[in-house]
Image (tube, rainbow, N blue to C red):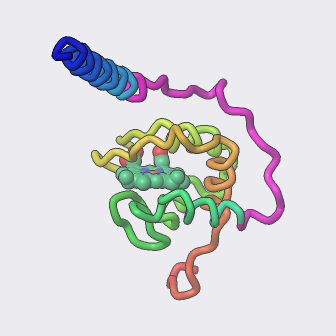
Amino acid sequence: MGKTKNILVLLFIFAFVISVALMILHTTKVANEKKISETDIVLIELPDDLSEGESLITESGCMICHQDSSKSVGPSWDAINERYKGDLTQILNLTMKVKNGGKGQWGEIAMTNHSHLKSDDIQLMIAWILSRKSNESDPKK
Ligand code: HEC
Protein backbone atom coordinates (compact mmCIF):
# COMPACT_ATOMS: atom_id res chain seq x y z
CA MET A 1 0.00 0.00 0.00
CA GLY A 2 2.69 2.48 1.06
CA LYS A 3 4.58 1.70 -2.12
CA THR A 4 1.65 2.72 -4.37
CA LYS A 5 1.37 5.96 -2.45
CA ASN A 6 5.07 6.66 -2.98
CA ILE A 7 4.75 6.04 -6.70
CA LEU A 8 1.78 8.41 -6.87
CA VAL A 9 3.72 11.11 -5.03
CA LEU A 10 6.69 10.59 -7.38
CA LEU A 11 4.38 10.80 -10.41
CA PHE A 12 2.89 14.00 -9.08
CA ILE A 13 6.31 15.57 -8.54
CA PHE A 14 7.37 14.42 -12.02
CA ALA A 15 4.31 16.05 -13.65
CA PHE A 16 4.91 19.23 -11.68
CA VAL A 17 8.57 19.44 -12.76
CA ILE A 18 7.58 18.87 -16.40
CA SER A 19 4.96 21.65 -16.31
CA VAL A 20 7.40 24.11 -14.78
CA ALA A 21 10.01 23.20 -17.43
CA LEU A 22 7.44 23.71 -20.21
CA MET A 23 6.41 27.06 -18.77
CA ILE A 24 10.02 28.26 -18.67
CA LEU A 25 10.61 27.05 -22.24
CA HIS A 26 7.51 28.89 -23.43
CA THR A 27 8.52 32.15 -21.74
CA THR A 28 12.00 32.00 -23.27
CA LYS A 29 10.52 31.32 -26.69
CA VAL A 30 8.20 34.31 -26.45
CA ALA A 31 11.05 36.56 -25.29
CA ASN A 32 13.23 35.46 -28.20
CA GLU A 33 10.48 35.95 -30.74
CA LYS A 34 12.09 37.13 -33.93
CA LYS A 35 11.64 40.76 -34.88
CA ILE A 36 9.97 41.28 -38.20
CA SER A 37 11.64 43.12 -41.05
CA GLU A 38 10.35 45.06 -44.08
CA THR A 39 9.98 41.98 -46.21
CA ASP A 40 7.58 40.42 -43.70
CA ILE A 41 4.99 43.10 -44.35
CA VAL A 42 2.72 43.18 -47.38
CA LEU A 43 1.28 46.64 -47.92
CA ILE A 44 -2.51 46.69 -48.01
CA GLU A 45 -4.71 48.81 -50.22
CA LEU A 46 -6.07 51.52 -47.97
CA PRO A 47 -9.84 52.03 -47.82
CA ASP A 48 -11.25 55.57 -48.30
CA ASP A 49 -12.78 55.42 -44.86
CA LEU A 50 -10.05 54.97 -42.28
CA SER A 51 -12.32 55.02 -39.23
CA GLU A 52 -11.61 51.31 -38.68
CA GLY A 53 -8.03 52.38 -37.91
CA GLU A 54 -9.34 54.53 -35.08
CA SER A 55 -11.45 51.70 -33.63
CA LEU A 56 -8.47 49.34 -33.81
CA ILE A 57 -6.36 51.89 -31.93
CA THR A 58 -8.95 52.06 -29.16
CA GLU A 59 -9.29 48.27 -29.00
CA SER A 60 -5.54 47.61 -29.06
CA GLY A 61 -4.63 49.60 -25.96
CA CYS A 62 -2.57 52.24 -27.77
CA MET A 63 -4.31 54.95 -25.74
CA ILE A 64 -2.60 53.66 -22.59
CA CYS A 65 0.54 55.43 -23.84
CA HIS A 66 -0.68 57.85 -26.51
CA GLN A 67 -3.13 60.76 -26.53
CA ASP A 68 -4.62 62.84 -29.33
CA SER A 69 -2.90 66.14 -28.66
CA SER A 70 -0.67 65.94 -25.62
CA LYS A 71 2.42 63.90 -24.91
CA SER A 72 2.00 61.07 -22.39
CA VAL A 73 4.30 58.02 -22.27
CA GLY A 74 4.60 58.24 -26.04
CA PRO A 75 4.23 61.18 -28.46
CA SER A 76 0.72 62.45 -29.28
CA TRP A 77 -0.96 61.47 -32.55
CA ASP A 78 -0.74 65.16 -33.52
CA ALA A 79 3.03 65.21 -32.98
CA ILE A 80 3.51 61.99 -34.96
CA ASN A 81 1.28 63.33 -37.72
CA GLU A 82 3.25 66.56 -37.77
CA ARG A 83 6.57 64.77 -38.10
CA TYR A 84 5.55 62.37 -40.88
CA LYS A 85 2.90 64.64 -42.37
CA GLY A 86 0.65 62.62 -44.64
CA ASP A 87 3.62 60.64 -45.90
CA LEU A 88 2.02 57.26 -46.45
CA THR A 89 5.38 55.79 -47.51
CA GLN A 90 6.09 55.84 -43.76
CA ILE A 91 3.44 53.16 -43.19
CA LEU A 92 5.95 50.34 -43.66
CA ASN A 93 8.50 51.89 -41.32
CA LEU A 94 5.96 52.74 -38.62
CA THR A 95 4.12 49.41 -38.85
CA MET A 96 7.43 47.66 -38.18
CA LYS A 97 8.11 50.01 -35.28
CA VAL A 98 4.75 49.24 -33.65
CA LYS A 99 5.19 45.49 -34.24
CA ASN A 100 8.73 45.32 -32.88
CA GLY A 101 8.59 48.15 -30.36
CA GLY A 102 11.64 50.28 -29.67
CA LYS A 103 12.91 53.71 -28.75
CA GLY A 104 15.14 56.49 -30.00
CA GLN A 105 12.92 58.49 -32.32
CA TRP A 106 11.21 60.49 -29.58
CA GLY A 107 13.33 59.83 -26.53
CA GLU A 108 14.65 57.10 -24.32
CA ILE A 109 11.32 55.55 -23.35
CA ALA A 110 10.64 52.47 -25.46
CA MET A 111 7.34 51.44 -26.99
CA THR A 112 6.49 47.85 -26.07
CA ASN A 113 6.30 45.38 -28.96
CA HIS A 114 2.93 44.49 -30.48
CA SER A 115 3.90 41.25 -32.17
CA HIS A 116 0.42 39.87 -31.40
CA LEU A 117 -1.27 42.42 -33.68
CA LYS A 118 -1.79 41.79 -37.40
CA SER A 119 0.36 43.92 -39.74
CA ASP A 120 -2.74 44.69 -41.81
CA ASP A 121 -4.48 46.13 -38.77
CA ILE A 122 -1.44 48.17 -37.74
CA GLN A 123 -1.24 49.64 -41.25
CA LEU A 124 -4.84 50.86 -40.88
CA MET A 125 -4.00 52.42 -37.52
CA ILE A 126 -0.92 54.21 -38.91
CA ALA A 127 -2.86 55.42 -41.94
CA TRP A 128 -5.51 56.84 -39.59
CA ILE A 129 -2.84 58.60 -37.48
CA LEU A 130 -1.14 60.07 -40.56
CA SER A 131 -4.36 61.40 -42.02
CA ARG A 132 -6.17 62.59 -38.91
CA LYS A 133 -6.95 66.26 -38.36
CA SER A 134 -6.03 67.97 -35.10
CA ASN A 135 -8.82 68.71 -32.66
CA GLU A 136 -11.04 71.72 -33.40
CA SER A 137 -9.73 73.34 -30.24
CA ASP A 138 -6.16 73.12 -31.47
CA PRO A 139 -5.06 76.66 -32.35
CA LYS A 140 -2.81 75.32 -35.13
CA LYS A 141 -5.76 73.94 -37.04
C1 HEC B 1 3.75 51.05 -23.41
C2 HEC B 1 3.48 52.29 -24.04
C3 HEC B 1 3.07 52.28 -25.50
C4 HEC B 1 2.02 51.60 -26.09
C5 HEC B 1 1.05 50.62 -25.46
C6 HEC B 1 2.01 52.03 -27.48
N1 HEC B 1 3.00 52.94 -27.71
FE1 HEC B 1 3.44 53.82 -29.49
N2 HEC B 1 5.05 54.72 -28.64
C7 HEC B 1 5.42 54.64 -27.31
C8 HEC B 1 6.67 55.35 -27.11
C9 HEC B 1 7.41 55.51 -25.80
C10 HEC B 1 7.04 55.86 -28.38
C11 HEC B 1 8.31 56.63 -28.75
C12 HEC B 1 9.36 55.64 -29.27
C13 HEC B 1 10.64 56.30 -29.75
O1 HEC B 1 11.12 57.22 -29.13
O2 HEC B 1 11.19 55.83 -30.79
C14 HEC B 1 5.98 55.45 -29.31
C15 HEC B 1 5.98 55.78 -30.66
C16 HEC B 1 4.95 55.48 -31.55
C17 HEC B 1 4.91 55.90 -32.94
C18 HEC B 1 5.98 56.73 -33.65
C19 HEC B 1 7.14 55.81 -33.99
C20 HEC B 1 8.32 56.48 -34.64
O3 HEC B 1 9.33 55.76 -34.88
O4 HEC B 1 8.30 57.70 -34.93
C21 HEC B 1 3.74 55.38 -33.47
C22 HEC B 1 3.26 55.52 -34.90
C23 HEC B 1 3.09 54.66 -32.41
N3 HEC B 1 3.83 54.74 -31.25
C24 HEC B 1 1.89 53.99 -32.56
C25 HEC B 1 1.35 53.15 -31.60
C26 HEC B 1 0.20 52.30 -31.83
C27 HEC B 1 -0.57 52.22 -33.13
C28 HEC B 1 -0.02 51.62 -30.67
C29 HEC B 1 -1.08 50.57 -30.38
C30 HEC B 1 -1.06 49.40 -31.21
C31 HEC B 1 0.99 52.05 -29.71
N4 HEC B 1 1.81 52.97 -30.32
C32 HEC B 1 1.08 51.58 -28.41
C33 HEC B 1 4.73 53.97 -26.31
C34 HEC B 1 3.67 53.12 -26.53
Left/right placement of residue 135 relative to residue 79 reads right
The residue positioned 74% from the left and 38% from the top of the image is 43
Q: Please identify the residue farthest to the left as the structure is shown.
A: 2
- Magenta range: 29-51
Image quarter of the N terminus: top left
Instruction: Please identify the dominant SS of the magenta region.
Output: loop
Using the image as rendered, state which of residue 61 and residue 28 is in the foreground. Answer: 28
Q: Please identify the residue farthest to the bottom as the structure is shown.
A: 137
Left/right placement of residue 111 relative to residue 62 reads left
The residue positioned 22% from the left and 21% from the top of the image is 9
Using the image as rendered, state which of residue 58 and residue 39 is in the foreground. Answer: 58
Inspect the magenta stretch and tell me whether residue 58 lies in it: no
The residue positioned 67% from the left and 60% from the top of the image is 53
Instruction: Count all numbered tags in the image, as a single digit.
Output: 0
Left/right placement of residue 112 relative to residue 14 reads right
Using the image as rendered, state which of residue 109 and residue 22 is in the foreground. Answer: 22
Q: In the displayed structure, would residue 49 be above or below residue 93?
A: below
Inspect the magenta stretch and tell me whether residue 36 lies in it: yes
In the rendering, at what x and y percent does residue 23 appear? 34, 27
Q: In the displayed structure, would residue 61 be above or below residue 21?
A: below
Image quarter of the C terminus: bottom right
Q: Please identify the residue farthest to the front as the structure is shown.
A: 1
In the rendering, at what x and y percent does residue 88 appear? 69, 49
Displayed quadrant of residue 101: top left
In the rendering, at what x and y percent does residue 139 appear? 50, 84
In the rendering, at what x and y percent does residue 65 appear? 39, 60
The residue positioned 30% from the left and 48% from the top of the image is 109
Q: In the displayed structure, would residue 27 be above or below residue 106?
A: above
